[in-house]
């Protein structure tokens, strides 16, 4: 994904349903402690998407994503 976003703000150049479709998966990965920081283009895209007011509202409907922290704390390394 990171290479697909190289030189682009959004997957198809402009904001589209492709970004909306991918955001849910990436948001869940981030909440599950996936290290997007290691992927600069993906991380920047995620920040842009997260800053969009409709996205910020949309991720609270019907309810915010569950808190995965307790699962990580109990995980065996």
Image (cartoon, helix red, strand yellow):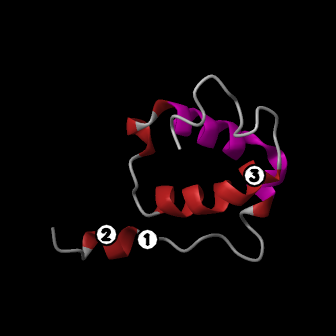
Specify the segment rendered in magenta. 41-57
How many angstroms separate mark 2 from mark 3 (CA)?
A: 30 Å
Q: Residue 28's spot in the image, x, y percent?
A: 54, 64
The quarter of the picture where residue 38 lies is top left
Marks 2/1 in contact by CB < 8 Å: the verdict is yes
Count of labels in the image: 3
Cα–Cα span, label 2 and label 1: 7 Å
Secondary structure beneath label 3? helix
Q: Do the residues labelled 3 and 1 touch (CB within 8 Å)?
A: no
Residue designated by label 1: 68
Q: Name the residue under label 2.
A: 72
Residue at mark 3? 18
Q: What crowding class fits label 3: few (fewer than 14 Cα within 10 Å), some (14-19), or many (20 or more)?
A: few
Measuring from the top left, give residue 76's x and y in whole percent: 17, 74
Residue that appears at 70% across and 43% down: 49
- Horizontally, residue 72 falls left or right of residue 13, namely left
- Labels 3, 1: front one: 3
- Dot 1 falls on a residue whose secondary structure is loop
């Amino acid at each position: 994904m990171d290479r697909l976003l190289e030189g682009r703000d959004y997957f198809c150049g402009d904001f589209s349903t492709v970004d909306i479709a991918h955001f849910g998966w990436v948001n869940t990965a981030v909440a599950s402690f996936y290290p997007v920081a290691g992927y600069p283009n993906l991380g920047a895209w995620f920040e842009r998407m997260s800053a969009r007011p409709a996205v910020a509202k949309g991720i609270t409907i019907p309810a915010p994503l569950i808190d995965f922290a307790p699962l990580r704390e109990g995980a065996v390394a």
